[in-house]
Amino acid sequence: MKKGIFAVCVFLMGSSALLGQKYFTKDGKVSFYSDAPMEKIEAHNTKAASVIDAENGQMEFAVLIKAFQFEKALMQEHFNENYMESSTYPKASFKGKIEDPGKLKLNENGTYETNVTGDLTIHGVTKSVTTPATFTVQDGQVVGKAMFTILIEDYGVKIPSVVKDKIAKEVKIDIESQYLPMDAKS
């Protein structure tokens, strides 16, 4: 599993034509919540890889679907096998841009609010998304946070009618990543 995350991180770093100061993480946190009347579903993943180019605002984010952890093992198994089909669609990704990157001063302490716009790919389906994001800079470390909601049906995830009342049609996604400057020699 660690080799897969490392490969995703290397891919993200190498596949982006990034210029200027770059920031990266391989320990980003992604959580999602489904709040249906019959059952609340929650999962967490702490192995997301991401790269940001501070000069032009380009960013990429990738998370392995099988790395999501649930409170109940059976729920995790159903999530991977029946809903997300993680053997066929092993990762979710985002490729986009921080709007108005000149507004962010990632080399100065402070909190900066902006929007992030790009293409979110889940379950093999890509949709454009725009979401507010907050970047907090403290002594060279950058923490990015975003929260948004998606509709399950928009990404082709099929929910069997037997459990449709247990799973909400909307899923709230929280992202938090602590970025470090990427060494120019890396």
Image (cartoon, rainbow, N blue to C red):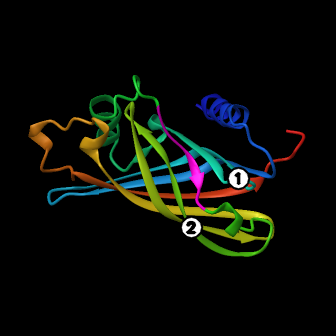
User: Which residue lies at the image location 42% right of the left edge and 46% below the top edge?
Assistant: 128
Residue at which label 1 appears: 56
| Depth order, front residue of 39/167 | 167
Q: Where is residue 40 drawn, in percent x and y?
A: 25, 57
- The spot of residue 110 in percent (x, y) is 71, 76
Q: The disc labelled 1 sits on which kind of residue? A: Asn
Query: Does 47 lie within the magenta span?
Result: no
Residue at the disc numbered 2: 114
For the stretch drawn in magenta, what is the main secondary structure? strand
Residue type at numbered disc 2: Thr
- Quarter assignment of residue 80: top left
Rendering coords of residue 163 (x, y %): 14, 43
Q: Residue furthest top?
A: 88
The residue under the point 21% across, 51% down is 169
Q: Residue at x 44, y 62 (%)?
A: 147
Residue found at the very far bottom of the displayed protein: 110
Quarter of the picture holding the N terminus:
top right
- In the rendered picture of this protein, how many numbered marks are placed on residues? 2
Q: Which residues are magenta?
A: 91-99
Q: Residue at x 63, y 63 (%)?
A: 100
**In the image, 126: left or right of 15?**
left
Q: Secondary structure at mark 2?
A: strand
Tell me: residue 6, above or below residue 61: above
Is 71 situated above or below 105? above
Distance, label 2 to label 1, CA atoms, is 14 Å
- Label 1 packing within 10 angstroms: few (<14), some (14-19), many (20+): some
Q: Position of residue 29 (x, y in %)?
A: 54, 53
